[in-house]
């Protein structure tokens, strides 16, 4: 699992990029947040949507280079966080950003983490589902539900569905959707057309709150696991 060759990525390009181009990734993320008020402000807003409390156990799926873990600890230093990502370069950079003992990083597949079930009070999936085909997105959402404690919460932060044509156009321009062969375009479009709220519901998550940034380029759905139906004998 320590480099390209793992099959969890939607494309070989993404597999290569997340193994070897992590510094560039941080620059692209910084650029993407500029019209939304800047990366620091957006991450503080994301953390607010998580509704953190002292000493919660948090799973950060598809954690990337560790920026959200840093933002969470700035808000609530007593958290215990486990970050999971497929990219060896992402994990290496995340460990440098967050050397605190309260953060553990695991190189692995967010769809099959092998972490104990119902062992986290919060499960975060941050800006990663749009890169995945629908079958993989659903697998990650089902895993998030499995990991979440019965009274816990799952927050999925994703590409939103801008209400105006102008907003959609500007986002596509700023986020490089116009580049031929951009691997995020078809999967992001499929997720928005099918609806992240629909996919979460299909995977056993009940949406409690819906948040959007300004402009409405990013949405976040705060959810809770729905009870598993038991077959009657």
Image: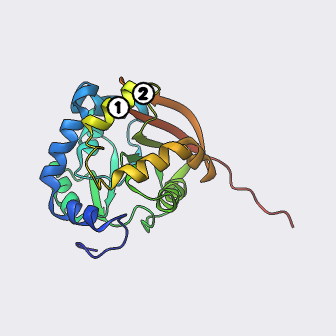
Residue 121 seen in the current view? no
Q: Name the one closer to the observer, 51 or 102.
A: 51
**Could you classify mark 2 by the number of other residues whose Cα lies within 10 Å: few (under 14), some (14-19), or many (20 or more)?**
few
Q: Name the one closer to the observer, 19 or 195.
A: 195
Residue ID at (52%, 57%): 138
Q: Name the one closer to the observer, 213 or 1.
A: 213
Residue 141 seen in the current view? yes
Residue ID at (37%, 68%): 8
- On screen, residue 51 versus residue 74, left or right, reads right
Residue ID at (30%, 39%): 72
Classify the position of the C terminus by image quarter: bottom right
Q: CA separation, marks 1 and 2?
A: 6 Å
What residue sits right under mark 1 in the picture?
A: 169
Q: Is residue 192 above or below residue 171?
A: below
What residue sits right under mark 2 in the picture?
A: 165
Q: Secondary structure at mark 2?
A: helix
**Could you classify mark 1 by the number of other residues whose Cα lies within 10 Å: few (under 14), some (14-19), or many (20 or more)?**
some
């Amino acid at each position: 699992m320590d480099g390209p060759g793992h099959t969890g990525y939607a494309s070989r390009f993404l597999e290569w990029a997340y193994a070897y181009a992590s510094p560039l990734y941080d620059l692209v993320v910084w650029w993407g947040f500029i019209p939304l008020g800047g990366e620091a402000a957006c991450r503080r807003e994301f953390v607010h949507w998580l509704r953190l409390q002292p000493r919660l156990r948090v799973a950060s799926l598809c954690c990337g280079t560790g920026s959200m873990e840093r933002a969470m600890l700035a808000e609530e230093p007593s958290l215990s966080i486990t970050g999971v990502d497929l990219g060896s370069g992402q994990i290496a950079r995340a460990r440098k950003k967050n050397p605190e003992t309260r953060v553990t990083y695991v190189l692995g597949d967010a769809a099959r983490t092998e972490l104990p079930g119902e062992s986290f009070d919060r499960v975060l999936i941050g800006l990663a589902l749009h890169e995945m085909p629908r079958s993989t997105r659903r697998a990650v959402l089902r895993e998030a539900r499995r990991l979440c404690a019965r009274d816990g919460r799952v927050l999925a932060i994703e590409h939103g569905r801008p209400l105006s044509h102008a907003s959609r156009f500007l986002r596509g321009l700023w986020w490089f959707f116009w580049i031929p062969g951009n691997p995020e375009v078809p999967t992001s479009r499929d997720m928005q057309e099918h609806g992240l709220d629909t996919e979460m519901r299909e995977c056993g998550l009940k949406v409690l709150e819906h948040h959007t940034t300004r402009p409405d380029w990013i949405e976040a759905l705060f959810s809770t696991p729905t009870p598993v139906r038991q077959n009657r004998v």
